[in-house]
Amino acid sequence: MEAMKQLKQWVKESHNIVFFGGAGVSTESGIPDFRSVDGLYNQKYDYPPETILSHSFYRQKTKEFYDFYRDKMLCLDAKPNKAHLKLAELEKAGKIKAVITQNIDGLHQAAGSKTVYELHGSVLRNYCTECGKFYDVKKIVDSSNVPVCGCGGVIKPDVVLYEEGLDNDTIQNSVDAIKNADMLIIGGTSLAVYPAASLIDYYRGNKLVLINKSTTPRDSAADLVIHDSLGKVFEQIEV
């Protein structure tokens, strides 16, 4: 496959690669995609998932938020897949300088990646909205109702809900990484979620690679497009 040959060559030549990934990176670990046919947005609940996962719903119906959150958002048995593992390997080899992810599952770090910018936060981190004390995910799992801090404050997952803004430092770090990249690989994302999707506009190089099962609005702007599963593509890349 000519595209695969080109990808391998570019990886070999590059020393400042940035990977930008979406839900498709984690689906091969068994974590459901939000927008696919069997994703969360196509399942039936009393409220649409977009509503449940909003800041206002969290504030007004905190118990219902947590019932859904525990049931559907915590995929704690998931393990890193071939794509996660290869990215960590490439970082260790000095090729990849940063992974920017829209996922909240912590699988990049579990695979061994060190420089990971989590645009939408992580389910593994939680904090008290009163005193700021941090808790791991066990606190959420072990609570049957709304998780509460020792100070009496409600504990909130460190994830970006609908109606909330992204963390400024995370955005700045992501922008800087993309600006300085000699190769940008985008994988497993429909590039439909903003402002995250607009970050790729900061790339200034000529090795923009898009790997996704389906077409994206940016295919025509890419230097190389591969429509295939990430695991299948990444397992062929040599370090």
Image (cartoon, grey):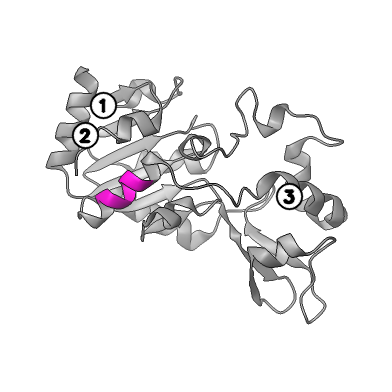
Q: What type is the residue that disc 3 sits on?
A: Tyr
Give how far across and how far down residue 215 sits, in percent.
44, 20
Nearer the viewer's eye, disc 1 or disc 3? 3
Task: Report helix, strand or loop for mark 1.
Answer: loop
Q: CA distance from mark 3 to mark 2?
A: 40 Å
Quadrant in which the C terminus is drawn: top left
Residue at left offset 42%, top offset 43%: 199
Q: Nearer the viewer, residue 96 or 79?
A: 79
Residue at left offset 28%, top offset 33%: 208
For label 2, count other residues whose C-alpha is less than 10 Å away and answer few (under 14), some (14-19) or many (20+): few
For label 3, count other residues whose C-alpha is less than 10 Å away and answer few (under 14), some (14-19) or many (20+): some
Read off the residue under disc 2: 206
115 in relation to 25, above or below: below
220 in relation to 143, above or below: above
Q: CA distance from mark 1 to mark 3?
A: 39 Å
The picture quadrant where one finds residue 155 is: bottom right
Residue at left offset 32%, top offset 23%: 225
The magenta-colored residue range is 85-90
179 in relation to 29, above or below: below
For label 1, count other residues whose C-alpha is less than 10 Å away and answer few (under 14), some (14-19) or many (20+): few
Read off the residue under disc 3: 69
Give how far across and how far down residue 126 sits, in percent.
65, 65
Q: Is residue 28 left or right of residue 13?
A: right
Query: N-terminal of the two: label 1 or label 3?
Result: 3
Looking at the image, the residue that sits furthest to the bottom is 151
Q: Are the residues flagged by discs 1 and 2 in contact, CB closer than 8 Å?
A: yes
Disc sitting over residue 223 in the figure: 1
Q: What type is the residue that disc 2 sits on?
A: Asn
Task: Report helix, strand or loop for mark 2.
Answer: loop
Query: N-terminal of the two: label 3 or label 2?
Result: 3
